[in-house]
Structure formats: C-alpha cells, structure tokens
Image (cartoon, helix red, strand yellow):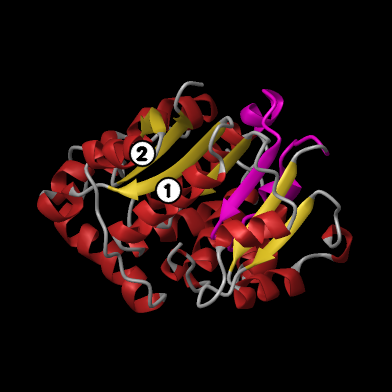
Amino acid sequence: MSNSIFRKDGTAQGVAKQRYIETIADPAKRIIEDHFAKHFTLGAGLIKIMGHGLNLWLTNKLAPGFHEHLIARTRFIDDLIEKSAKNGIEQYVVLGAGYDMRAHRLDLPDSLEVFEVDQPEVQLKKLTKLPDELSGLGNISYVSVDFTNQSVSEELISAGFDKTKSSIFTLEGVTQYITKDALNSTLNEIASLTQGTHTIFFLSYVDELLNQNPEACFGDGYPNPLKKANLIKNLSAKAADEPWISFYSSKEIENALLNNGFSLKENKILEDLNLEYFGPYGRDLPENQIFNLEHFVVAESKNW
C-alpha cells in the first residue's frame, strides 16, 4: 500500500476544529458530538468563547455549507459504524486515522476490535494529546506503519487483526490527496487481506466536476462557485501543504470497487443528507448554500 494514503496532520486538525464547533452548539440542535476534538484544535478555548453561532458565521463567510458538509460526512460515517457494529461486524479499521475519535465517542460494543492505522509521528501526536483515561483500552490497537519498509496488511495482522472475522474499513477525506494508483493499491490490498469474509468499505471522493464544471458541485445561487472551488482547493494546498490531486466520476469509483471485489451500496452527497440530518433541528441549508463536491460511498464485499 502506498505511503501516500497517510498524510500530515494539517487537514486532520481542520476537520477536528469543525467537529468541535459543532460540539459547542446547543445540545438540542447539534448533529454530532465530539468533546475530544478540543484536544486537537488549535485555539479551542477561544473557539468556545466565540460560540457555535459566530464560528459558523465565520466559516460560512469563507465557504457556505463547508461546515455542514464535514459534519454530514462525520454523521454519515458515525451512523454506518454504529449500524455495522450492531449488525455483528467484528473489526473496525480506520485507515489514515488522524484525530478520529469514533472508537471512544460512539456507542460501540466492547467486543468490537478497533485498529487505527497511521504514520508513527501522527499517532504519537494523537496519543500524547489523549486524556489519560482513554489510554490503554484493550479493544483499541494503534498500528503505526513505516511505509518505506512495512506492509499495512502485515502490521494489522501483527496487531491482532483476524483475517477470518468480518470487518469495516474507513478511508475518510483521503482519496483527493493520493494518486489513483494508490487508491487502487489500497483497495486491492484490503480485498486480499479480507478475502472470503464479510467486509464493508467506506471512502469519500471529490467529484471530477469540481475541475470540469465547478458550478455543478454547488446548489443553485451559490455565491461565486468558481472562485469558491479554487479557494477550497488552494486552501488545502497552501495551509496544510496537502494539495488535491485526484478527482473521480461515480462510474470510475464504482469500477475501482468492482475490480477489487466490492459492490457499491451507497453514494451520497450533502444534498441527499441535508433534510435528514439538519432538517429535524431547523438547520437545513437553503439551495444557495449546498456544497456537493464530495461523495460518501459505502461498498461491501461481493456475495454478501
């Protein structure tokens, strides 16, 4: 598996910040809750003082719908993990885990074995910031991989991953930063590792229309969509030194999954989840704030 699927932590910090902003919303209106995100958020104290409303206003000045997009992605994966665990999935592997805290904040059975995979330096940062009470939990394994001379599959097995058990893998917010060959290599390695078992795979990807026809990635009336598309791409490249290099069509992703033994089950965008997630709290976005550039995909091993 290419070492490029695991990144620096600039993007992980940004996503943690949005999770924390959502966490300080009115409990009756928040979509997700992640009190651990403050440990990975620069300026968390100031963000809390400013409050949810002001932070959301500032984010929307930059890119309307950006916060809701990331929170919808978080909630979509949260629901998928909890549902999969309740349905009997036995192992959960977080590829490029960054500052993901689902193993601690979701309602998951103690029997679910969790493997968080990332570069040694990123995991060290995470572990040094974790509250003491969260360290050393028996069902969570931190799998540090030096990709110059180690195999992810081999390291997972060494950490206790059981090839005969059912599993769910997540690759969240990563595919735009890696080559298409790297994604295919990742899918191929996971397919080989889990051959003959029930496997669920989540990934997100950025629509190729962001380059070809940016207006199509935003709702009608979205302000300056071409300018915002370039801003979003350039912000990641400049602020986090993590440029977006790969964009996909839905058919391209479906074929990549099929070629590696997975069947596409769901392919969602913010527009699909807007009313479901935000509507019940009176927070559904108007059309001119819809941010549809990233897709959320669920696939499953064939014959299951």
Q: What residue is pinned by disc 2?
A: 257
Please give the name of the residue rendered at 62% of the width and 60% of the height, measured from the top-left corner.
154
Of residues 8 and 117, which is closer to you in this image?
A: 117
| Cα distance between the residues tagged 1 and 2 | 7 Å
The x and y percentages for residue 287 are 27, 35
Q: Earlier in the sequence, mark 1 or mark 2?
A: 1
Of residues 128 and 301, which is closer to you in this image?
A: 301
> Residue 168: within the magenta?
no
Q: What stretch of residues is rendered in magenta?
A: 82-110
Horizontal side, residue 230 vs residue 282: left or right: left
> Residue 108: within the magenta?
yes
Of residues 47 and 295, which is closer to you in this image?
A: 295
Please give the name of the residue rendered at 52% of the width and 52% of the height, measured from the top-left corner.
53
The x and y percentages for residue 18 are 53, 56
Identify whether 270 is placed above or below 241: above
Identify whether 224 is placed above or below 109: below
Tell me where residue 231 sits by quadrant.
bottom left
Give the crowd class for mark 2: few <14, some 14-19, many >=20 residues within 10 Å. Answer: many
The x and y percentages for residue 160 are 75, 52
